[in-house]
Amino acid sequence: MSSFSDLRQLLLVLGIPFFIFLASLLTFIRGRHHHHLPPGPPGIPILGNLLQLGPLPHRFLANLHKTYGPLVYLRLGSVHTVTTNDSEIFKEMMSTQDHIFASRYQRIAIKYFCYNGMDLVMGPYGDAWKRLRRIGVEHLLSNRQTLSFQRHRREEADCMVRFVMEKSLKGELVPLRDGYNRRCQKALERMEEVVNPVLEDHRARRKGNPDVEPSNFIDLLLSLQEKQGEDVLSDVMIKALILDLLGAGTDTTAVTNEWAMVQLLRHPHVMCKLQEELDNVVGKERALDEADLRNLPYLRCVTMEVLRLSQPGPFVAPRECLKATKVARYEIPANTMVIFNLFAHGRNPKVWPERTEEFVPERHMQNVQGKGFRMENGPGPEFHYTAFGGGRRRCAGASLAMIIVMLAVGRLLQSFNWAPPAGMSKDDIDLTEVFGLSTPLAAPLFAVATPRLSIDP
Ligand code: HEM
């Protein structure tokens, strides 16, 4: 009798978890068939496909398209997720159905960012975001404003060239990772502690001098607040915008600069061709200036090709589908997380059929030459170039980003010849990346710089 009740207890203990497992398995399987979801790899109950992502999720997701096609469904824990590498689907989601896919996936936003719902990069689609986006695009990142901060960028570029020159004269190797931007990133992590005093400091300085022309983002935001009132632009919104622009603008451009230098070291013929363009357009008697950038189509192609192959954030800011809809005949449930895999799109042979995996800047030439050479960084009508995303959530700082990267790479190439450290060949350079909020090289790279200008930097 007692052994019978022991057996019953044992069956209960083993049976309940088994029953739960079976029930969630059935829900999982039924869920898949009930909706006509896009195809995707099988997952396990509860965790779904979470454990399959591995250390380089952008590569794992890119590989799935070979088996399951352009739109893939996964479950990351309990989160319905779809991912794509396809121009037509990008266009459908970022243009035709942009209003449905214009929000950010909120649970990630809450985890990584403060000012819940009040920030521009991760905020949900809605009135608060629209207001911030307007301030960002019309006031902080407009062409006029970008131009007015040109002097600061020139000073930064001079400073960078002097740093490389010092290393070069001492016969030391130059680290290609931008130390200044790394420090900014560290500061950003504890920004909440420092941003309040910084704001107060700027406010106090403006009090004595209210009419002075704003010379940085913070002064500009404070002057807007003075004009429009705190109801329209509160202190919290100002802080969120400052953090947004620092977060979205520093690591992305630093990592792109690093990848650009790596690709140039690996492709000396591209480096020579770029230096030839710089010598023809700018010469060796003066330093490259921002006004020169629109006359340097090859430099622009090099930057575009770097971004095609090495997106600084392969899917930095996942979107959220606001209501149930259909894309490419498949059902997408409401609140699905949408990952536009920019890394996979940049390496999709359907989009880039020729020498897909190779670094060939010339492939962009037809888009930047002659009359077609506009300082425009949009995805184009067919959504072929998506380094800056698309639709209403498209990168708000795309033009500024291109200026920053082209200026830095242009100055470094105009001022120096570059080679890998002694004993290392170009083919020894390790291209392995690490995945995080950005994707830099796993092993920091150093290089030898030799001055080539006839003026002092
Ligand atoms: C090479 C550098 C950069 C790259 C590759 C890049 C790329 C991107 C991408 C892919 C997105 C998401 C777009 C989408 O969801 O469709 C984004 C968003 C954003 N970027 Fe950039 N970005 C760069 C630099 C910058 C800079 C310099 C700034 C400004 C200082 C900036 C400001 C923003 C903002 C504010 C958003 C959020 C837009 C919104 O959600 O409405 N980015 N960026």
Image (cartoon, rainbow, N blue to C red):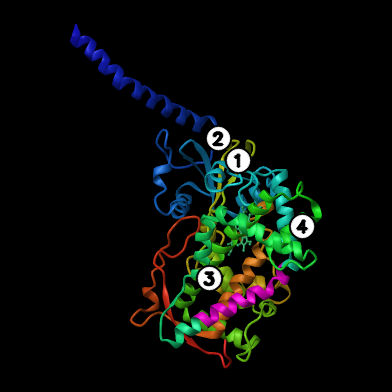
Residue 246 visible from this viewpoint: yes
User: Which amino acid type is shown beneath numbered disc 4?
Assistant: Leu
User: Which amino acid type is shown beneath numbered disc 2?
Assistant: His
Nearer to me, 304 or 367? 304
Residue labelled with disc 2: 36
Residue labelled with disc 3: 257
Q: In this view, does 261 lie to the left or right of 219?
A: left
Disc 2 from disc 1: Cα separation: 8 Å
Residue 348 visible from this viewpoint: no
Disc 3 from disc 1: Cα separation: 40 Å
Residue labelled with disc 1: 329
- 299 to 226, vertically: above or below: below
Q: Residue at x 42, y 86 (%)?
A: 170
Residue labelled with disc 4: 224
Disc 3 from disc 4: Cα separation: 33 Å
Q: Which of marks 2 and 4 is nearer the N terminus?
A: 2
Query: Could you say where residue 129 lies in the image, as x and y percent from the top left?
Result: 69, 47
Q: Do the residues labelled 3 and 4 touch (CB within 8 Å)?
A: no
Classed neighbour count for the residue bearing mark 1: other residues with Cα under 10 Å, few (<14), some (14–19), many (≥20): few
Determine if the magenta segment contains residue 148.
Answer: yes
The label nearer to you, 3 versus 1, is 3
Q: Which of marks 3 and 2 is nearer the N terminus?
A: 2
